[in-house]
């Protein structure tokens, strides 16, 4: 590795030398001063520091050995990239910038690179230094990026907790339920994906939300769709498994949330949360009261860090402890009801096979009013089985696909999961408990 001379060209100019590990604080201060105000840094501070240690880095220091400038380069195949280039403003900053660029060129020359390139923002203060050093502006190029929300260091924790990254099309794949989707888009997704806009409008990005509604209405599907829409990892916490390998359910819950704290950009989902957050009552206290108390303590801790969203779901919102739903723990308490006509249309179309091309979907949508997605899936599979048995009876080569009547007959024999009484209770809960 070629060493750069530490002798200044002219008295009074900062001298350029190799990066030393002791320069990290100076690099951090320099990066924050020149990058944070505009928010346009191409490379994150963590990437810059990694390259300082692993790639090619030079610093400019004053007479007190204080870092006043730095340049960091990285080689990728036959091309070199400038990862970071900054100089504190002074009367000699242009000379210092030129010295840093020239020094990096000499440092990376032995690598046999075909070109040395830089990505810069429009307001890049060192733009003229690049031009003076022989760099050329490439026209008609656009810089594109997509954040990767799971880093290598987080993968092991994510796997341990049973988490995963979801397909990015789940939100769009959910047909219908426009009111619910619009509400989640405005209350959850937009403040989290547009934080600067939210701050300007005085909106605090949500940290926790409760979904409630009758069984089988798709609360889990909505939680996964939110994670997909955000592009965040998804972890489902199963109350029934919290005691596995732990002294108690409360200890298992505490350990799980401790590991989750190591992750960024994650949606944590707890279904049937009433199992661990039911009304506390009775003397002596029931075993579940300790779990409820633990969860009540964990939620404020969870809310203290950005980049995480807790979604809880319950079929019995009335069973939850009153302290659990107080303001300050859950930002919103959102009802998820039975699928509307548009949603049922999308569900039916998902389950209709190619051989069912003559089925009148509108008839199925009308006849399945009041059914959950799971009810519709059961009826669709039952009709498909009837068609299969009919085709087998007709002999080889005969394919008699499901008909409209097959599906209507299957619906007539399917018992709806949600009774009229449950629907009435749900509507009452919307009036009493929902917080939108």
Image (cartoon, grey):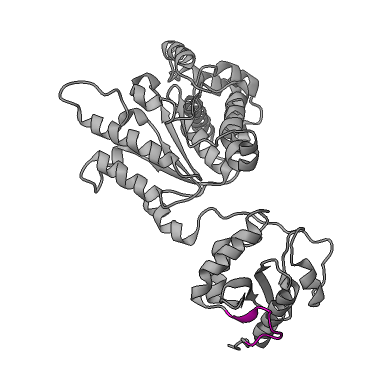
Q: Is residue 44 above or below residue 108?
A: above
Type of secondary structure dominating the magenta stretch = loop
> In this rendering, does residue 78 appear at all?
no
Q: Is residue 420 magenta?
A: no
Where is residue 157 drawn, in percent x and y?
40, 55
For this rendering, which residue is in front, 86 or 298? 86
Highlighted range, magenta: 7-18
> In this rendering, does residue 178 appear at all?
yes
Q: Quadrant of residue 107?
A: bottom right
For this rendering, which residue is in front, 348 or 213? 213
Q: How many marks?
A: 0
Where is residue 39 drawn, in percent x and y?
65, 53
Q: Identify the residue shown where x is 33% and y is 23%.
A: 321
Where is residue 422 drawn, in percent x and y?
42, 14
Where is residue 179 drawn, in percent x and y?
61, 24
Q: Identify the residue shown where x is 60% and y is 22%.
A: 404
Q: Residue furthest right?
A: 139
């Amino acid at each position: 590795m070629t060493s750069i001379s530490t002798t200044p060209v002219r008295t009074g100019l900062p001298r350029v030398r190799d990066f030393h590990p002791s320069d990290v604080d100076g690099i951090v201060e320099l990066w924050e001063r020149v990058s944070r105000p505009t928010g346009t840094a191409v490379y994150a501070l963590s990437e810059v520091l990694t390259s300082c240690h692993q790639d090619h880095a030079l610093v400019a220091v004053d007479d007190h050995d204080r870092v006043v400038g730095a340049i960091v380069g990285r080689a990728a195949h036959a091309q070199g990239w400038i990862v970071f280039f900054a100089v504190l403003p002074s009367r000699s900053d242009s000379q210092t910038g030129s010295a840093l660029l020239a020094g990096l060129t000499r440092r990376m020359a032995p690598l046999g690179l075909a070109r040395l390139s830089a990505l810069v923002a429009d307001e890049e203060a060192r733009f003229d230094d690049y031009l003076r050093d022989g760099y050329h502006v490439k026209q008609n190029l656009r810089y594109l990026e997509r954040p990767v929300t799971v880093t290598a260091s987080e993968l092991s924790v994510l796997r341990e907790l049973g988490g995963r990254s979801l397909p990015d099309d789940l939100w769009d794949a959910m047909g219908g339920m426009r009111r619910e989707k619009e509400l989640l888009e405005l209350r959850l997704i937009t403040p989290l994906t547009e934080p600067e806009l939210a701050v300007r409008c005085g909106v605090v990005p949500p940290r926790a939300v409760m979904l409630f509604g009758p069984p089988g209405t798709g609360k889990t599907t909505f939680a996964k769709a939110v994670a997909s829409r955000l592009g965040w990892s998804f972890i489902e916490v199963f109350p029934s498994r919290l005691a596995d390998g732990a002294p108690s359910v409360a200890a298992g819950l505490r350990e799980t949330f401790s590991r989750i704290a190591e992750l960024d950009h994650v949606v944590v989902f707890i279904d049937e949360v009433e199992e661990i957050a039911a009304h506390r009552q009775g003397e002596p206290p029931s075993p579940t009261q300790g779990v409820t108390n633990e969860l009540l303590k964990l939620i404020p801790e969870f809310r203290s860090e950005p980049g995480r969203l807790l979604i809880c779901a319950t079929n019995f919102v009335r069973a939850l402890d009153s302290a659990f739903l107080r303001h300050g723990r859950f930002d919103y308490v959102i009802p998820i009801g039975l699928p509307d006509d548009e949603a049922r249309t999308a569900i039916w179309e998902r389950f209709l096979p190619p051989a069912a091309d003559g089925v009148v979907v509108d008839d199925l949508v009308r006849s399945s009013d009041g059914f959950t997605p799971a009810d519709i899936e059961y009826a669709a599979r039952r009709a498909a089985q009837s068609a299969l048995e009919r085709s087998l009876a007709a002999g080889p080569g005969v394919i008699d696909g499901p008909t409209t009547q097959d599906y209507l007959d299957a619906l007539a024999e399917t018992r709806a999961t949600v009774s009229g009484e449950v629907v009435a209770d749900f509507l009452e809960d919307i009036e009493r408990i929902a917080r939108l």
